[in-house]
Image (spheres, rainbow, N blue to C red):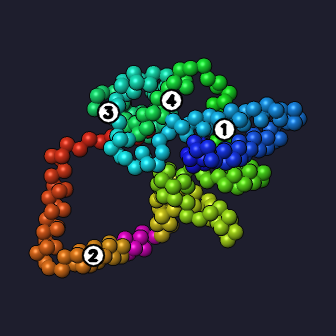
Amino acid sequence: MPRDYYILPKFTTRLSKRQEAIFNAMHKLAFHILDDHEIYTKMIQEAAQNVAELEMKIAMASWPDTQMRNFAQQYNAFNIAELKKAYPSIGWQSYLDKLLSRVGSVDFTGSNRKLIITQPSYFGWLNALFSGDFDQKTIVNYMITQLIFEDADFLGGIFKDVAESADYVPYAMRRGKGVARVGQQLTRTENSATDPNQPCINLMTQYMPYGTGFVYVKSKGAEERTKVKEDVSAQTELVLKNFVVSLFPSEPQILFLKNTVDRVFSEEPSHQILTNKCYL
C-alpha cells in the first residue's frame, strides 16, 4: 500500500483491509500445507495483525515522496567500517555478500569504497529493531507474506485471487521501483483478458529491460542483424541531425554545440568522478 495509507488516520479502513488481505494469504497457505488448518485460525489472525503493524512501522520509518525528491539529502556515503559502526546490529557483510553473490566477490574495504544510504532514518529504525527484543516470528511471517503476494501470479488459484482482490502490484512493476524504474504498463486484468502471455512478458521486461530485445535480436541471422543495426544507426543519426538543426539553424551554432560536447567528454578525467559501488 502507499505510505499514506499506513500513516494518516483517515485511512484506517485501508489498514484494516490490508490486515484482512494478509490474513487471507496466510489462511490459504495453511489450508494447503496443514491437515486441519482451522485450529490455527486465531494464531493466524494474531500473526496477520503483527505483520500489518510491522508494515506500518516500516512506513513510519521511511521517507515520504516529498523527501524522496530531494536527491542531495539521499546521498549519504559510508564505507563498510562506518556502516558497521553506525548500524552495528545489521549484518552488513552477510547482507552484501548475499546481495552480490551472483556477480562474484566484491571487496568493500578501503575508505574510497562507498555505499550510499538513501534513507538513514529507515536503517536507524531497522538497527534499533534488531538490537531490541523483537519477535523473530513476525519478521519470518512478514517475509512469507511478501513472497506469497509477490509470486501470486505464478502460484495461481486462490493465491492469485487474494492478490487481485488486494490490488497487489509486484515490486518490479511499481512506479519508480525495480531495475527498469518504470511503471506498470497495463493492469493485470487488461493483460489477462487479451493475452495470458502478456503478464509474463511484462514482468520479464521489468526485471530484464533488455532481455526481450536481446532474445529477438539473437533469433535473427547475422546478416539480417547487421542490416538492422545499420538501419538503426542511420535513423538515429538522422533524428539527431534534424533535432540539432531545428534548434540551431545556422552551421556555426551546430559546430559550437558539437565542440562543446566533445570538450566535456574529453575533460571527464579532470572532474575526478567517483564510482559508487551500491545504493541502499
Give the residue type at disc 3. Arg
Q: Position of residue 276 (x, y in %)?
A: 33, 40
Tag 1 secondary structure: helix
Look at mark 3 in the image and give the residue it sits on. Answer: 113
> In the image, which is nearer the foreground, mark 1 or mark 2?
1
Quadrant in which the C terminus appears: top left
Mark seen at residue 198 = none
Label 2: state its secondary structure: helix
Q: Is residue 22 visible?
A: no
* Span of residues in magenta: 221-230
**Residues at marks 3 and 4 touching, judged by CB atoms closer than 8 Å:** no
Callout 1, which amino acid?
Ala
The disc labelled 2 sits on which kind of residue?
A: Phe
247 on left or right of 84: left
Is the C-beta separation of discs 4 and 2 under 8 Å?
A: no
Which residue is farthest left? Answer: 252
Judged by depth in the image, the label closer to the viewer, 1 or 3, is 1
Amino acid beneath label 4 = Trp
Q: Position of residue 163 (x, y in %)?
A: 70, 51
Give the answer, above or below, for where 216 lies relative to 43.
below
Query: Residue 49 in magenta?
Result: no
* Chain-order first, disc 4 or disc 2: 4
Magenta segment's dominant SS is helix
Give the mark nearer the N terminus: 1 vs 2: 1
Residue behind mark 2: 243
Question: Gap in Å between the C-alphas at discs 4 and 1?
Answer: 17 Å
Callout 3: SS: loop
